[in-house]
């Protein structure tokens, strides 16, 4: 069996990958466990560093090819695909940096009489075989975030790419091989969902890294073998609070970027914007004007700012959600129409009902909702009312107001005077509530993929 990879813009086939069956995965899991258990087979840190350095060089040489592959299989505009490629290279560089910065620590023993005469220290060991399942929206950098730390930490890793975007993952794994990594340490595993589930819940899996839907992630977590550690990264419905009197020039451009980047197919995309009711008409008109000015179309063209949704079915879903919101009383300020079977206009909705799908679920499409508020506490209550909590944002010229919002918003990170989708690859990145479990970011993932071991030495201070 194969996956046919379609260009999401024109639905033309651009490649295919052969699927791996369970007997092959079963052999690879055995191999991964044996590699981990054979201490003589483990790669010393300097060899891992050399492999990653060579991989970085190869990625730099092929940066434009990698970026075009992202645009072709994922529909991300080429200008943003180039940024993703640069970030993926930097993510691998961060793996090396973390190896240089990592180490153990001394544990004081003589704080009580019971510990006197002893010395203690810690060091880190690889956790064991890693199984990574990734998402389509950042098909190169997400793989770098899951596979890079595993290789750097000395863990064998089996990686299943998203069905829609396996080519970037395949390219990254092949670059690692070309850089000198033995294939046994990293396996490219395109497979059916049934095989993927077997691989995840197998007792040989020491760590499970998942980026994707909450429904699938929490289901798999419930089936993990005892002892398997994990990290889940899901989505949210990111809220933005705007204070009164803030210049629109400080707010509108970042919201346009954070709401319509990759046509909203980002787990922390701007979705729900709360503005003072008296300023709502002007604010909505200006945001709508900006949305209508965005260039939508072929992601391989330099001028394109919003590309296709990943599948035509997603266009159908987003259209149905927007139509239902409008029927429920929302005002359509911009967009709201299909542009063929694969494109949807950047859309701005004003005051959609609180029970509409666009208000209570992750849209994962080019839709931004604006709500007027009279009382900031009521707005914060509405922002916090969902079972998701990831990144949020606040725009204000008053630091005291911003601080109040930061303290009261349910979020793992709050951006002040910036959009919710801001991220650099070394910062902690984590969902709360149903939005995830554990913390992403290169250094944090490397900690997850290793375990601390302590040594306590009974060493009297003098010899008689």
Image: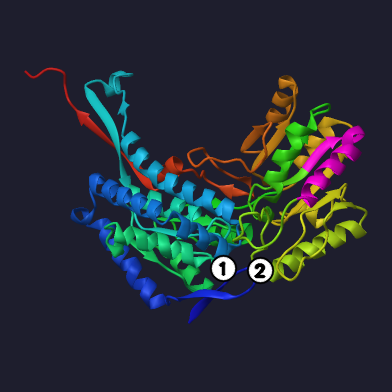
Depicted 343 relative to depicted 268: above or below: below
Q: Position of residue 367 (x, y in %)?
A: 76, 53
Location of residue 327 (image quadrant) = bottom right
Judging from the image, what secondary structure is the residue with disc 2 in? loop
Residue in view at x 72 percent, y 64 percent? 343
Instruction: Give me the disc on residue 311.
Output: 2
Question: Is the Cβ of the residue at disc 2 closer than 8 Å to that at disc 1?
Answer: yes
Q: Main secondary structure of the magenta part?
A: helix
Depicted 14 relative to depicted 237: above or below: below
Does residue 284 belong to the magenta stretch? Answer: yes
Judging from the image, what secondary structure is the residue with disc 1 in? loop
Residue in view at x 88 percent, y 47 percent? 351
Taking 195 as reference, is 457 left or right? left
Location of residue 117 (image quadrant) = top left
Instruction: Give me the disc on residue 164.
Output: 1
Q: Residues within 10 Å of mark 1 (few under 14, many from 20)?
A: many
Instruction: Decide which of 213, 53 is in the foreground and name it.
Output: 53
């Amino acid at each position: 069996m194969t996956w046919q990879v379609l260009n999401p813009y024109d639905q033309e086939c651009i490649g295919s990958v052969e699927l791996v069956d369970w007997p092959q995965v079963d052999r690879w899991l055995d191999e991964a466990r044996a590699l981990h258990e054979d201490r003589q087979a483990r790669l010393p840190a300097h060899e891992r560093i050399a492999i990653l350095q060579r991989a970085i060089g190869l990625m730099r040489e092929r940066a434009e090819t990698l970026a075009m592959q992202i645009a072709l299989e994922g529909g991300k505009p080429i200008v943003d695909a180039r940024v993703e490629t640069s970030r993926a290279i930097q993510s691998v560089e961060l793996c090396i940096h973390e190896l240089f910065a990592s180490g153990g620590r001394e544990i004081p023993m003589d704080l009580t009489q019971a510990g006197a005469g002893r010395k203690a220290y810690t060091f880190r060991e690889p956790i064991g075989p890693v199984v990574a399942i990734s998402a389509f929206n950042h098909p190169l950098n997400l793989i770098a975030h899951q596979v890079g730390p595993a290789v750097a930490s000395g863990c064998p890793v089996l990686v299943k790419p998203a069905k829609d975007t396996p080519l970037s993952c395949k390219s990254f794994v092949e670059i690692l091989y070309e850089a000198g990594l033995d294939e046994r340490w990293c396996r490219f595993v395109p497979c059916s969902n049934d095989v993927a589930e077997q691989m995840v819940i197998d007792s040989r899996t020491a760590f499970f890294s998942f980026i994707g839907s909450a429904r699938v992630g929490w289901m798999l977590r419930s089936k993990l073998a005892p002892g398997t550690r994990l990290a889940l990264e899901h989505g949210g419905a990111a809220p933005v609070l705007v204070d009164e009197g803030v210049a629109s020039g400080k707010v509108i451009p970042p919201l346009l970027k954070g709401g319509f980047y990759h046509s909203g197919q980002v787990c922390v995309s701007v979705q729900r914007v709360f503005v003072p009711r008296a300023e709502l008409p002007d604010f909505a008109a200006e945001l709508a004007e900006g949305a209508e000015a965005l260039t939508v179309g072929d992601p391989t063209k330099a001028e394109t700012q919003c590309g296709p949704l990943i599948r035509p079915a997603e266009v159908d879903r987003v259209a149905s959600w927007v139509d239902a919101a409008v029927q429920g009383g929302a005002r359509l300020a911009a967009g709201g129409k299909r542009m063929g079977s694969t494109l949807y206009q950047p859309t701005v909705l004003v005051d959609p009902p609180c029970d509409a799908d666009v208000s209570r679920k992750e849209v994962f499409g080019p839709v931004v909702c604006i709500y007027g508020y009279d009382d900031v506490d009521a707005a914060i209550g509405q922002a916090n009312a969902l079972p998701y909590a990831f990144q949020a944002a606040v725009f204000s010229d008053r630091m005291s107001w911003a601080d109040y919002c930061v303290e009261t918003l349910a979020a793992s990170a709050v951006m002040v005077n910036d959009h919710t989708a801001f991220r650099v690859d070394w910062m902690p990145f984590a969902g709360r509530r149903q939005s995830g479990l554990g913390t992403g970011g290169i250094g944090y993932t490397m900690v997850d993929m290793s375990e601390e071991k302590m040594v306590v030495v009974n060493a009297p201070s003098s010899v008689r």
